[in-house]
Amino acid sequence: MNSDWYKDRVFYQIWPRSFKDGNGDGIGDLYGVYEKLDYLKELGIGGIWFSPFYPSPNADYGYDISDYYSISPEYGDLEIFKKVLDRAHSLDIKVILDLVINHTSDEHEWFRQSRDKDSPFRDFYFWRKGKKPGKAPNNWSSFFSKGAWTLDPKTMEHYLHLHHVKQVDLNMDNPAVREEVKKIMRFWLDMGVDGFREDVITYISKPKTLPDDVFFQAVKGLRFYDCGPRIHEYLQEFRTDVLDKYDCFTVGEAPMITPEKALTFVSGPHPDLNMVFGFRHMEADCLLKEYIPLPFNLRKLKRAFTHWQKALNGRAWNALYLENHDHPRVLSRYGSEKYHDESGKMLAVSYMLQKGTPFVFQGQELGMTNFALKDISQYKDCVAHNVYARAAKILPEKLVMSVIQRATRDNCRSPLQWSGAANAGFSEAEPWFPVNKNYPSINAEDEDRDSDSVLNFYRKVIAFRTQSDIVRNGDYKELMPMHPHLYVYERRWQGQTLLVICSFTEKACRFRFPKGFDPSKAQPVLCNYKNAPQADGRTLLTRPYEALVYKFY
C-alpha cells in the first residue's frame, strides 16, 4: 500500500478453469496461462487477478478452499505458479490473488477438527444450538441455499454458511483465525504477489449474538452480517500487521455497498482497502440479482455510474468493471448480439474512460456472449441448481430454464474462445464445460488479424487510457442524465476536455453538442466505426451502438 501503481494499470481477471488448457486434460490451468502471457501484454494489461486456484472440492469452483498454501493439482503446482509470476513480472504485469477468508471449505482441516467439541478449532467457526429441536439458531438465509445453517448429526449443533453448505463461515472474532489469515497473506506476498482481491470481505464480522434478520432490513438489502461491528478493526489489523510492510494493494468485493459506505473503507490517511467493487451498476436489467429480470434501463445504469464517480472524486479511487465470474456476459445484457462488434466496443468505452482502475474479465475483450444449454443437468453453477430446485416446484420448467439460461454465472465461465479450431482452441481434449457454439466467428485468432475487431478496439482503448492524463486524473461530469439511449460524460484536466458519447440503442439519436463544446474544435480520438461522423452544425446523428470520444483543447 506504499504506492499508487494500481491507478495506472488495467487488470485482467483470469478464471483459471476456463482460460487455457496447457496440459491437455480439458481443464484450464497455469500452464495455459503461461502460454498466453504475451497475449495479455499485447492487450495492454498491467495486472492479473487470479480467481482461486487453491485445492478445493469445487462446490463453488474454487471459492470453497481446502488448503490456502498450495495449488489445486488440476491447475498445476507452486513451481508453475512461480514461473507464471516471474514471467508476468518480467513483462511488467502485476499479479493479485483472490483472498477468500469469509469462509473455508467443509473439507478444510480446520473444519474437520472443529467437528470435535473439545478441539481448539471449534471456535474457528460458528457452531450453535438450535432455538429448539429442528430449528436453526436464527433466521438468516443463504445466498446459495434456503437456510444459512446446517445441523451436524455428530454434535447436534448447527454451523453457519452464508453461501454453499460446503462454504463454512469463519469466526473472525477469534484472534487465532485472524493470525491464520495474516500467515496466508504473508505466504503469498513473500512469494512475490502484488496484492489481493478480497472475497465478500464486508461479511467477515458478525454481531456477537447473531440476531434474527428484521424483515424490512432484509428487503432493503441490509443484513446483520454486512459491514459488521468490528469490520474496520479487523481490516486495519490486517493492513497494519501485514499489508503496510509490502508494496501491494487490495480491492474488496462488497455486495450491497453504497458509495457512501464504501468511503468508510477506502478513504482517509490509512484506508482499510485501496478500492472496493460495488454492484449497483450490474442491476440495470434486473431487481438486485440477475434471476429477477427486468428490461434494460440505461438511466438506472447511468445513475449508478455517476453516483460512484461523484461520491469518490477526490476522496478515493474507483474500481471499474462490467464483467466478472459472477455475472452473465454484459454484451448479451447491456449491448446487442445483433450489433455484436458495435456494442462490444461501445461498452468498453462506456466504463473504461471513467475515473478509476478498469478490470476486464477473460473473453470480454473478444465480445463473448451468453449461450443457452437445454437441460439443467448440463449446468455446473450451484446457484443455478438451487434456483431450479426451488422455482421448478411452482413454475413451468420452460420458464425456469429460460431465466437460468439468461442469468446463470456459467454464461461467463465457458472456455475462452482462442481460435476457430476444435474446442475453440481451448484444449485438445473435450473441455470440462461446453464451448459456446459461436466460437468460429468470435475468437482471439481471427480478431487478432482483423484490425476492426472488438479485440483490437480494446487494445486501442486500453492504450489510450493508460497514456492519457485526462483519463487518469480528470474530473467526471455526466451530461444528459435523463436521455433514455445516450450516455454522455466529460472528463476535464488542466485545460483539456474529453467528451464521451455512448449510444445504447440501434435507433438513430440526434446529439447536440452542449454549450461550451465547439464541434469545429473537436478532435475525434476514438470511434467504434471506421470513421467518426461529421457534425451538421452543432448536431450529429448517432449510428447503432456508436461510441465517440472527442478531445477539446
Image (cartoon, rainbow, N blue to C red):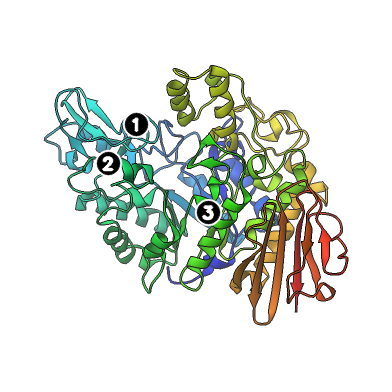
Of callouts 2 and 3, the N-terminal one: 3
Instruction: Give how far across and how far down residue 79 sits, in percent.
Output: 48, 46
The residue lying at 58 percent from left, 19 percent from top is 398
Residue type highlighted by circle 2:
Asp
Q: What residue would you read off at disc 2?
A: 213
Residue 366 figure quarter: top right
Q: CA distance from mark 2 to mark 3?
A: 44 Å
Tag 3 near tag 1, CB within 8 Å: no
The residue lying at 60 percent from left, 34 percent from top is 414
Of callouts 1 and 2, the N-terminal one: 1
Residue 356 figure quarter: bottom right
Q: Which mark is residue 85?
A: 3
Q: Which mark is residue 230?
A: none
- Is residue 527 visible from the viewing direction of this image? no
Instruction: Give how far across and how far down residue 361 sits, in percent.
Output: 59, 47
Task: Please state, as top left, top right, bottom left or bottom right, where the N terminus lies in the image.
Answer: bottom left
Residue 271 lies, with reference to residue 427, above or below; the image says below
